[in-house]
Image: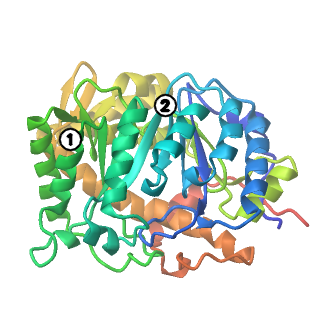
Amino acid sequence: MTGPRVAGLRPSDVLASFDGPLGAYVHIPFCEWICPFCPYNKVLARLGLAADYFAALLTEIDMYGAGPFTSLYVGGGTPTLYPQHLAEVLPRIPVTGERAIEVLPLHGTVERLGVLKEIGFTAVSIGAQSFHDPVLRHLHRPHDAAQALAAVHHALDTFECVDVDLIVDVAPEEPSQHPGAFLTDVRTCFAMGVDQVSTYPLMRFGYTPFGEARHNRHREHEILAQVDALARTMGYERRSVWTFNRIGSAPYTSITRRRFLGFGAGASSFAGRDFYVNHFGLLTYMDTVRRGHPPIAKWLHLGRAAGMAYDTFWQAYSGGIDTGSLSDSYGRWARLIRPALAPLAGAGMVTREDGVYRLTARGFDQYHDIERWVTYHFIEPLWAQMLAEHKREGSHVPWAETANARSGPTWRVVERALSRRVESRAG
């Protein structure tokens, strides 16, 4: 399967575009069970396909020859399906910091977690989503509450850093269903002493089966405020919009590394002034790598202004905007940060101390809403475009009805302004 590639872009060009230390991300797109709320690039696992995919993945990693990376995060999909292949991947990616992986609770057994630790992982994120069976059935998860709890306990006995993912979906919290379930789940995590609880709001991407319902942002604000209050009484602190960490625990996150290089089908990379997206279609991804080309399907050249906006946005997610680091990366453009944030400071959404703007509780609420707007107006239309590669390959993923994805003039204008030329390749 052939497809378009960015004209003339070489691995050395990509690496040269980075302006500082970078983390590594690896995407494993295989699942044995498709969760209908998940918008990430994924396909049902098929016999033989994984071996071909991992061979291409190793080739891509070697193509860049980069490192050492500040950290490694392996996501999916369900990356814990293939520990034998991961054992070949980790030695190829030199890392000075943590090596983290997403773990499906069904795979959170003593034996499987022990293998992951032996391979070299130092941190795990357990995708529990809830410890209430009715909520798990609502989300169509493949595990039950007992399995999720067991996975967390086993992880705490095995790893030095354990994150637990919980989904904030206010629908099951209604009085007629399961009120208080989410807060009870958070309290359970705090009581067990996990290092971090990630309270992700359910994202209703239009191309997923969960895309039709609307958000109740005020109720989501209320629930997160309750989590914040509970955290303070149980030895935890809010370190980002959606994460709560045990006081004294090491910092851990999957998405706020300032620079990162992504490997695999569906991975993306941010270099500071450039944003790259790999092919989502597995056949196209593998074919491009076999031909010796970086599997980059879309290249957005942000430049200093848009690059700084992206950087600032994700710094804000972690609760603090460091004007010094922005000045180092973007020069005079960083002078715009202070006047831009002045109205937010006046409205009580940020405070300023030693050149760092920190979000207040009110600021976290506003960011919660802004992040959703950005997700639906930029990430969703981009991913919908990329997911269409599966259909062109003849392997359409039935959970992603890309025709139902949100799109609008905002994304079209940005894409037209920032996209670098893509050329087609003949078979």
Q: Position of residue 88 (x, y in %)?
A: 71, 38
Q: Quadrant of residue 46?
A: bottom right
Q: How many marks?
A: 2
Q: Position of residue 173 (x, y in %)?
A: 16, 68
**Element under disc 2:** loop
Q: Front-most of 206 and 94?
A: 94
Residue 120 in view in this figure = no
Please state if 227 lies on the left or on the right of 407 as rendered.
Answer: left
The quadrant of the rendering that contains the N terminus is bottom right
Q: Residues within 10 Å of mark 1 (few under 14, many from 20)?
A: many
Residue denoted by label 2: 122
> Which disc is residue 190 wearing?
1
* Of callouts 1 and 2, the N-terminal one: 2
Q: Quadrant of residue 175?
A: bottom left
Q: Is residue 18 above or below residue 5?
A: above
Please state if 423 lies on the left or on the right of 163 as rendered.
Answer: right
What residue is at 46 percent from the left and 69 percent from the top?
Answer: 35
Q: Position of residue 232 (x, y in %)?
A: 11, 36
Q: Front-most of 281 and 114?
A: 114
What residue is at 34 percent from the left and 27 percent from the top?
Answer: 322
**Element under disc 1:** helix
